[in-house]
Image (cartoon, helix red, strand yellow):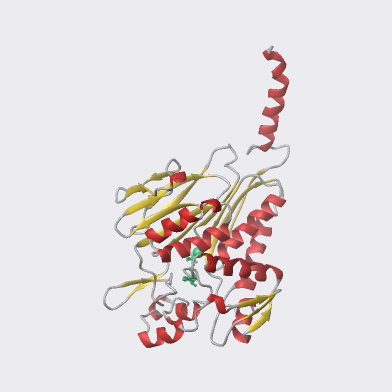
């Protein structure tokens, strides 16, 4: 009886070996490339027969940077900010449409018009030029912050006087999605994209096991823990990435609370979002950081159909995990305790 299964099993085995890492016949092997884009170091590892693929992905990232960067004078976003209205490319308009919807969905915790405030704090400049702005200045700038005032008709965007757009909180997540899509189109089944700590995993590792993605300890030099995932984006916003310490020894970071004009200090020091789409994960990593642990947990419960999982790190040393990650996260640091966020 069983011997009749044998040919089928052999065929399956062949199929798997053809997808495996060392497949000299197809020429498939690890192709890697590191480069600088979007103010960060990006690294690509893709298992493919096509030697030129990593350079094509680099071109995707550089092209999106050229169009989305708020600081590059010739970008679409800079032109919109300068001229108050602009005809956008299909990609940029599509990203803006999604970003505005996410601003609304997060109740303005994500606000793509917070840029004047970010600039006033000096986060677009070097560390020595960062300082706490005077409250009157912040109040004036805050009056210009409101994503609801951005209009998008077709691909034509317009801003009210004084408002400025910054897609920095979502651009890297979107770029990772575009790079992953290019890999899928090329038939790649295993890849790891690292966009400055924003991780996109495509499929599993070539041996069929999950990728291990490290999360940085927001209070120290080492690791907080490791996530086991496949075919997911893992995107972190942390207070430790870009910050300065003022003359009173107080620490201020680059994630703003659009409700106050001050860096968000609502109980979280790091937020990791795991999900199928980098754009959504990137938007939520910023927005949930702003919300703080209770509102973030509530948001997650109200959006179970988004199929995202969270690692929230509180300032008093608790790692809050959504239930779907309890078997996928292993804690590396002894300085934290784990709690699972109730799903009901
Ligand atoms: P990073 O780019 O460091 O990975 P984020 O994805 O959290 O981190 O994006 C932070 C960037 O987004 C900031 O540098 C700033 O330009 C912008 N930003 C800060 N706060 C907000 C906010 N509440 N909503 C939208 N954009 C924000
Ligand atoms: Mg973000």
Compared with 86, 304 (above or below) is: above
The residue that appears at 67% across and 81% down in the rendered structure is: 86
* x and y, in percent, of residue 344 in the image: 42, 48
Displayed quadrant of residue 21: top right
| Residue 73 at least partly seen | no
Q: Left or right of 5: which side holds 137? A: left
Residue placed farthest to the top in the image?
A: 1
Residue placed farthest to the left in the image?
A: 248
Q: Left or right of 302: which side holds 64? A: right
Displayed quadrant of residue 100: bottom right
* x and y, in percent, of residue 198 in the image: 52, 58
* x and y, in percent, of residue 334 in the image: 30, 48
| Residue 192 at least partly seen | yes
The residue that appears at 45% across and 56% down in the rendered structure is: 272
The residue that appears at 68% across and 23% down in the rendered structure is: 9
- Between 30 and 39, the one nearer to me in the picture: 39
Q: Quadrant of the N terminus?
A: top right
Compared with 152, 193 (above or below) is: above
The residue that appears at 67% across and 54% down in the rendered structure is: 181
């Amino acid at each position: 009886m069983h011997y009749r299964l044998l040919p089928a099993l052999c065929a399956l085995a062949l199929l798997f070996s053809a997808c495996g890492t060392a497949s000299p016949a197809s020429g498939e092997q690890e192709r890697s490339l590191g480069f600088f884009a979007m103010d960060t170091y990006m690294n690509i590892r893709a298992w493919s027969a096509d030697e030129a693929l990593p350079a094509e992905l680099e071109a995707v990232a550089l092209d999106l940077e050229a169009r989305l960067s708020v600081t590059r004078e010739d970008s679409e976003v800079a032109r919109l900010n300068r001229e108050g209205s602009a005809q956008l490319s299909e990609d940029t308009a599509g990203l803006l449409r999604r970003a505005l919807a996410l601003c609304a969905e997060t109740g303005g915790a994500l606000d793509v018009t917070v840029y004047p405030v970010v600039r006033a704090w000096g986060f677009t400049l070097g560390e020595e030029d960062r300082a706490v702005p005077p409250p009157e200045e912040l109040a004036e700038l805050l009056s210009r912050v409101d994503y609801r005032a951005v209009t998008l008709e077709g691909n034509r965007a317009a801003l009210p006087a004084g408002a400025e757009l910054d897609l920095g909180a979502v651009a890297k997540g979107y770029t990772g999605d575009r790079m992953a899509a290019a890999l899928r189109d090329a038939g790649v089944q295993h890849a790891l994209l690292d966009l400055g700590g924003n991780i996109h995993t495509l499929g599993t590792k070539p041996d069929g096991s999950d990728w291990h993605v490290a999360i940085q300890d927001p209070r120290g030099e080492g690791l907080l823990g490791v996530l086991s995932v496949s075919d997911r984006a893992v995107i972190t916003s942390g207070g430790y990435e870009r910050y300065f310490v003022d003359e009173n020894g107080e620490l201020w970071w680059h994630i703003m609370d659009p409700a106050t004009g001050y860096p968000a200090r609502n109980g979280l020091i790091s937020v990791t979002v795991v999900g199928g789409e980098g754009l959504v994960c990137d938007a939520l990593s910023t927005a949930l950081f702003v919300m703080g642990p209770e509102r973030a947990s509530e948001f997650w419960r109200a959006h179970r159909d988004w199929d995202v999982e969270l690692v929230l790190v509180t300032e008093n040393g608790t790692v809050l995990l959504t239930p779907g990650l309890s078997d996928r996260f292993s804690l590396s640091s002894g300085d934290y305790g784990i709690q699972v966020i109730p799903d009901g």
